[in-house]
Image (spheres, helix red, strand yellow):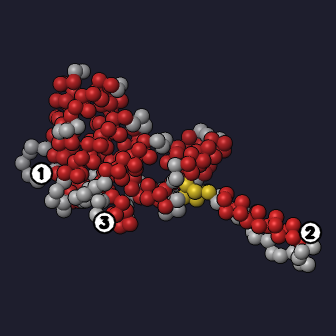
Amino acid sequence: MSESKFKCKLKKKIEDVFDVGTEGAVSIIGELTGKSLFGTFAPRLTTAFFSYKQKRFEKNINKAIDELKKRETELNERLSAVENRQSFIESFELIWDYIIEEPQEQKIQYMVNGLVNLAGHEQIKEDFVLFYYDTLSNLRLVDIAILKLYYGNYANAASYQDILDEFNIDYDQYNAVREKLVRMGLLKTKYTDDLDKLYKNVLTIQEYLDGKSKKLKRLERLSKRDSYSISSLGENFIRFFLDKYGQDLNDEITNST
């Protein structure tokens, strides 16, 4: 398929999915989807068309449009409350870059959920968008599943064994993913705290053995629980991409002081 035919096909899909150009209520997100794809993003759209496997490229864009349609009512409600949507359009254009490059199609629903959470803000920090979407692009589905396991409020999180079975991984691979999430700041570990407690216990025992203490002081208990827990960044990440964000994320998203 030529580039011109693809663009015509894409415009037709947007018009059909969002009823753009028909009589009745105008779909704000439908119009903005067209503007974001064929506005200043258009040169990158052309470059991407020739740079990536066309089948995946088309599949990802179509998937994103379908996901946007599912959230159309919510998006329109949020966007209707915003007078100046330029910041949202610019963020939308950035997000298309991540969508067309994503090798795991299932993650596109998370990208769209993030977009929904950006809607309703007149000023959006570009650094916020880039940081969160860069982080998402560096995670695979198995990474996200394990992160969800540590997010206590996530009702649909799978169990440890479910994850091993679904992704066909063993404990060593599971642990490697947890270490990756720690390096990315999404999980944190109690290892350092336990190391400090262990050091204090050794000193206490040494004092007792050296006769400096007549009675062995009470030793600090080491945790037998999982040494990993979700960080505040990890919680915000889950809320932004998988759930509806809380008010605590507003200051991060916007440029307001």
User: Callout 1, which amino acid?
Assistant: Val
Q: Residue at x 22, y 27 (%)?
A: 6
Give the answer, above or below, for where 161 lies relative to 230.
above
Q: Which residue is mark 2?
A: 209
Instruction: Find residue 41 and name its label.
Output: none
Where does residue 29 sit, x and y in percent of width and height? 20, 49
Mark 1 or mark 2, which has the lower sequence index?
Answer: 1
The structure residue drawn at horizontal position 31% and vertical position 50%, both measured from the top left corner, is 126
Q: Earlier in the sequence, mark 3 or mark 2?
A: 2
Question: Which residue in the structure is indicated by mark 1?
Answer: 26
Decide if residue 2 is in sight here.
Answer: yes
The image quadrant that residue 134 belongs to is top left
Q: Marks 3 and 2, how far apart in space? A: 58 Å
Residue sitting at 30 percent across and 66 percent down? Answer: 257
In what element is the residue under mark 3? loop
Numbered badge on residue 257? 3
| Residue closest to the far top | 2
Q: Secondary structure at mark 1?
A: loop
- Amino acid type assigned to the residue bearing label 3 in the image: Thr
Q: Nearer the viewer, mark 3 or mark 1?
A: 3
